[in-house]
Image (cartoon, rainbow, N blue to C red):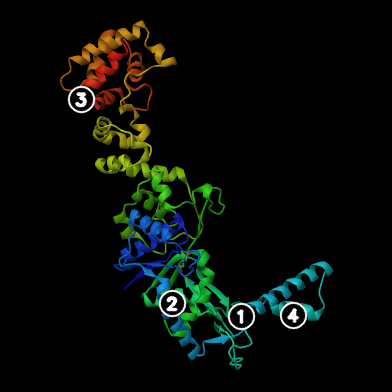
């Protein structure tokens, strides 16, 4: 069975890059009748916070990417990680190493000094050059081949990288990638205080959770070369890897805050719908022909690793807005009303305004691109009487303009079936009888009814405001 996982480090919010990784992992599991798991990689106790864990879980819930099983917290598995490290030592695939951080630092300092010397003197003696080469090579401890340890020395456990040969990872996005073992450090698995390193923990957990497919950002591609030898040394099958290119800003540069490298909660606050964000994130790195609007059902049917893009995707707010507008228009009107009423800017709305907005939502949702934009789109439904007209709008209310409003108030006053279609007929008939174009009354009515707030067609505005409110707003202008 296919088992995927999303493995965020809880050091901040659920970033949209992470959300996309989670989405791909979720979809791949759904597409293959598999399982999608969540692992909270909280081994960095200093940087991990409960607030970040909550923000991540909340973000995933909002997007509908809740894991199929309760989350695994990596820090709780530390004993198991230690046990595997010791098992690797027993197997001869790892070793205890007493070299201290200070000694390692001394090596780095020596290398730095030689580099400085090289730059200053324009070269090095053969002996120094050889020494620098040696120091710059991936680390191989003198204790890797069984040299007896000094008594009582604190040790770290290091993986013993194979002496020769190379490792090829058949990445499902990047294709085959090969690295010689000589280019890889004898990496640390357990620190001298006994805490497991991230590299060890990931491997053990992926194995123990039965993960078959790892979909993650391509910033982790190099880690694969450190992780695969651990799987091999334990005789475990390594998962299939798919390293997805990063999301870039519209200018092709690394995504920054300015570009929208925000938490998904920020997208929620901006008024995007979760299904729209999922659709957009799916297209941002995966494609199915030229399809832009892809429902969740279609995504589950179509999703595969082959169509993941090899090139970095660019975040494009215009596209996101277009996708969101599509989902807004399709969304259930009551749901949208509830989402809007829960927002801060809707807190001052009266009961009357709320019920007008709720009743108007079928129209409003086709005009507002986001839940946040519903505020502006529904402003004409607020209790704004008496509407004070200024400038150009006030000029429309000339004597002639007032006469037309008076005429229309009396004609609308006779309408019993207060509907868009009938009101439109009344308006058209009036214009025909007066021998004037609709342009002579449209702007006038619009100003008197909305005070210039964004609004749909006049006959629709009349219907949405209702008979009493419409006639009152118009009559106000006659005083
Ligand atoms: N915890 C890592 C991160 O947040 C992900 C590790 C992985 O997916 O293997 O970048």
Q: Upstream in the sequence, badge 1 or badge 3?
A: 1
Q: Of all residues shown, which one is farthest toward the front?
A: 152
Q: Residue at x 28, y 44 (%)?
A: 331
Q: Report the number of numbered marks.
A: 4
* Residue marked by disc 3: 419
Q: Upstream in the sequence, badge 1 or badge 2?
A: 2
Q: Upstream in the sequence, badge 2 or badge 3?
A: 2
* Residue marked by disc 1: 182
Left-right relation of 13 to 27: right
* Residue marked by disc 2: 78
SS of the residue at dot 3? loop
Q: Residues within 10 Å of mark 4 (few under 14, many from 20)?
A: some
SS of the residue at dot 4? helix
In depth, the one of 65 and 50 nearer the eye is 50
* Residue marked by disc 4: 131
Residue 206: image x %, image y %? 41, 74
Residue 19: image x %, image y %? 41, 57
């Amino acid at each position: 069975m296919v088992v995927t996982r999303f493995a965020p480090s809880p050091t901040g919010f659920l970033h949209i890059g992470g959300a996309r990784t989670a989405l791909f992992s979720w979809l791949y599991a759904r597409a293959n009748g598999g399982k999608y798991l969540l692992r909270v990689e909280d081994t960095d106790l200093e940087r991990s916070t409960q607030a970040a864990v909550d923000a991540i879980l909340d973000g995933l819930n909002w997007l509908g990417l809740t894991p199929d099983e309760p989350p695994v917290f990596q820090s709780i598995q530390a004993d198991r990680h230690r046990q595997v490290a010791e098992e690797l030592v027993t197997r001869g695939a790892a070793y205890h190493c007493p070299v201290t951080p200070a000694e390692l630092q001394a090596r780095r300092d020596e290398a730095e000094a030689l580099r400085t010397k090289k730059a200053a003197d324009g070269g090095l003696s053969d002996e120094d050059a050889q020494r620098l080469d040696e120091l710059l090579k991936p680390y191989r401890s003198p204790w890797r081949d069984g040299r007896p340890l000094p008594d009582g020395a604190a040790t770290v456990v290091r993986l013993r990288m194979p002496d020769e040969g190379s490792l090829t990872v058949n990445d499902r996005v990047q294709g085959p990638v090969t690295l010689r073992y000589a280019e890889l450090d004898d990496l640390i698995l357990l620190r001298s205080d006994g805490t497991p390193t991230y590299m060890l923990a990931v491997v053990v957990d992926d194995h123990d959770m039965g993960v078959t497919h790892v979909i993650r950002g391509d910033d982790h591609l190099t880690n694969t070369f450190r992780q695969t030898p651990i799987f091999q040394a334990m005789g475990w099958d390594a998962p299939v890897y798919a390293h997805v290119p990063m999301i870039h800003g519209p200018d092709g540069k690394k995504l920054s805050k300015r570009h929208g490298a925000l938490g998904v909660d920020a997208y929620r606050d901006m008024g995007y719908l979760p299904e729209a964000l999922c659709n957009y994130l799916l297209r941002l790195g995966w494609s199915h022909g030229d399809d832009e609007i892809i429902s969740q059902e279609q995504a589950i049917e179509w999703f595969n690793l082959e169509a993941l893009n090899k090139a970095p995707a660019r975040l494009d707010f215009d596209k996101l807005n277009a996708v969101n507008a599509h989902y807004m228009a399709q969304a259930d009107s009551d749901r949208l009303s509830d989402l809007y009423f829960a927002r801060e800017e809707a807190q001052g709305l009266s009961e009357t305004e709320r019920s007008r907005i709720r009743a108007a939502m079928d129209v409003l949702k086709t005009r507002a691109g986001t839940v946040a934009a519903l505020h502006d789109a529904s402003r004409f439904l607020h209790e704004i009487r008496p509407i004070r007209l200024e400038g150009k709008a006030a000029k429309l209310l000339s004597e002639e303009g007032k006469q037309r409003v008076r005429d229309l108030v009396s004609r609308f006053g006779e309408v019993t079936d207060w509907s868009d279609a009938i009101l439109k007929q009344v308006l058209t008939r009036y214009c025909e009888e007066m021998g004037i174009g609709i342009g002579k009354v449209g702007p006038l009515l619009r100003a008197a009814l909305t005070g210039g707030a964004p609004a749909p067609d006049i006959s629709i505005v009349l219907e949405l405001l209702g008979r009493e409110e419409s006639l009152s707003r118009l009559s106000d202008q006659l005083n």
